[in-house]
Amino acid sequence: MMNRDLARYVDQQRSLGFKFRVQHILLRGYVAFAKERGDRHIKSARVLAWAARAPSPEQRRNRLLTVRRFALAMYAENPRHQVPAADALGHAVVKRRSPYIYGADEVARLLRAAAALQPTGSIRPKMYATLFGLLAATGMRVAEALALRLDDMTADGLVIRETKFQKSRLLPLHTTTRQALDGYLVARRSLTTLDRALFVSVVGGALPYNTVRRIFLQLLDRTNLRGAHSGRDPRIHDLRHTFAVRSLEQCRHDYAVVSWHLVALSTYLGHAHVTDTYWYLQATPVLMGQIAEASEALLQGGAA
């Protein structure tokens, strides 16, 4: 019975545009656990017992909330299903890993190291230099970059299609970024592959994330950036944080201008709400200096 309920629930979520992959895997695990114990309906105690098997508090809470959403939908059809309390395992504690803000020289070193990859004369060095340069210049998510197709390169910029939050957007490009992409496209279009992915692997298919991450770690070794973030490795995703911070550093010291800039930045990054963009901002010496100057002007009766 619960298998049928789960199948209907998954179909419903996917019809609404959700990929629902991880949630489906979790729910299958719970349903199998419950069926082994003879359950025909969702039981709160069983949900908690299954969630408690996860190895960390975050994963346990994620299990609970995933099944709870399923239980709410099933309870609306049949009150014999029980809905566990959202705080049955305590309240979530959001832990933010502070991002690593790359210096301009560090980004340049990464791109030079990428351009020096082997084999010389192949598309591989140009491709990785272009990929990481594009991430640094646009702040796009690495998954968005790897999903790009040749047709997504338009005269007006890059088209990012239905990524996170099922949104598409157009990314206007700086002239230098456009020139670098055009140079890469010459080499990319010379490859004999039917795959239309912008960035391709050595076998001609779309470039997988695990391969990109492995190459990125090699580049950290070659640029002495291993452990540069208080003993931890900088991440590819930190290029996105760096883009957000550096763009704000270049913004004029004016309240209205900063407000407009944040709205534009949020749209460019593909965020659903401007509050999501705040998560990407990090205090830097430049920003702290600008805040100090604005605060001093305010105290002296000047413009904030």
Image (cartoon, helix red, strand yellow):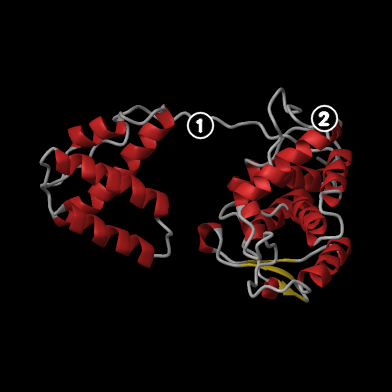
- Residue ID at (19%, 32%): 45
Residue 286, image x, y percentages: 85, 35
Q: How many marks?
A: 2
Q: Which residue is at the front of the view, 288 or 41?
A: 41
Residue 157, image x, y percentages: 75, 70
Q: Which residue is at the front of the view, 83 or 154?
A: 154
Residue labelled with disc 1 = 94
Residue labelled with disc 2 = 299
In front: label 2 or label 1: 1
- Give the side of residue 168 with respect to residue 264, left or right: left
- At label 1, counting other C-alpha atoms closer than 10 Å, the crowd grade (few under 14, some 14-19, many 20 or more) is few
Q: Which residue is at the front of the view, 284 or 196?
A: 196
- Is the residue 196 above or below the residue 143 in the image? below
Q: Quadrant of the C terminus?
A: top right
Toward which corner of the image does residue 58 lie, by quadrant?
A: top left
- Is the residue 184 above or below the residue 61 in the image? below
- Residue ID at (61%, 47%): 210
Q: Residue furthest top?
A: 231
Rounded to the nearest angstrom, the CA distance separating label 2 from label 1 is 35 Å
- Residue ID at (85%, 47%): 250
Q: Secondary structure at mark 2?
A: helix
Name the amino acid type tagged 2.
Leu
Asked whether residue 253 is in view, the answer is no
Residue 185, image x, y percentages: 80, 70
Toward which corner of the image does residue 292 lie, by quadrant?
A: top right
Name the amino acid type tagged 1.
Val
Residue 303, image x, y percentages: 84, 41
Asked whether residue 283 is in view, the answer is yes
Q: Quadrant of the N terminus?
A: bottom left
- Nearer-N-terminus badge (2/1): 1
- At label 2, counting other C-alpha atoms closer than 10 Å, the crowd grade (few under 14, some 14-19, many 20 or more) is few
